[in-house]
Image (spheres, rainbow, N blue to C red):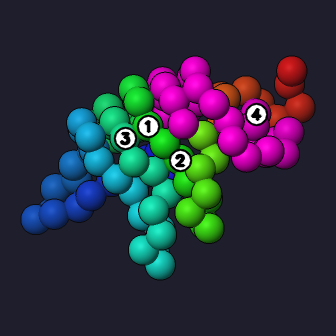
Amino acid sequence: RDDVESRGLGDVYKRQGYGTAFDREGNLLYTGMWKDGKRCGSGTEFDENGEIVFSGEWKDGKYHNGILYKKLTKDELSEASGQAPGQS
């Protein structure tokens, strides 16, 4: 989700500043700050039902410091925090 790019007039633009991301059905996935196309700074991630998954600080597209509202599997948490699955 973090490498989503907007395409226009044949050029590729990475997200910068405040913005939102939606899935193909129009459901809100993320609202907050972006840097170089990745979530960076304050932001909130939502699940497919509109429930908050994480709210807080992001760094290089990964959870950095905040509140995790939804229980994730070990592999999902590892992916979100930037660790390889199975690492502690």
Region in magenta: 55-78
- The percent position of residue 75, horizontal first and vertical second, equals 82, 42
Amino acid type indicated by mark 4 = Ser
| Residue named by callout 2 | 45
Q: Residue at x 62, y 67 (%)?
A: 49
Front-lying residue, 1 or 70? 70
Question: Would residue 79 be visible to someone looking at this image?
Answer: no
Q: What's the distance in space between the residues labelled 1 and 4, CA to CA? A: 19 Å
Question: Would residue 34 be visible to someone looking at this image?
Answer: yes
- Left or right: residue 74 versus residue 29 is right
| Residue named by callout 1 | 43
Amino acid type indicated by mark 2 = Glu
- The percent position of residue 65, horizontal first and vertical second, equals 58, 21
Labelled pair 3, 1 in contact (Cβ < 8 Å): yes
Labelled pair 2, 1 in contact (Cβ < 8 Å): yes
| Residue named by callout 3 | 32
Could you tell which of marks 2 and 4 lies nearer the N-terminus?
2
Q: In the image, which is nearer the foreground, mark 2 or mark 4?
A: 2
Q: What's the distance in space between the residues labelled 2 and 4, CA to CA? A: 16 Å
Q: What's the distance in space between the residues labelled 2 and 1, CA to CA? A: 7 Å
**Magenta-span inclusion, residue 64:** yes
- The percent position of residue 47, horizontal first and vertical second, equals 61, 59
User: Residue 17 occupies which quadrant of the picture?
Assistant: top left
Could you tell which of marks 3 and 4 lies nearer the N-terminus?
3
- Crowd band around label 4 with a 10 angstrom C-alpha radius: few (<14), some (14–19), many (20+): some
Per the image, label 3 sits on a secondary structure element best described as: strand
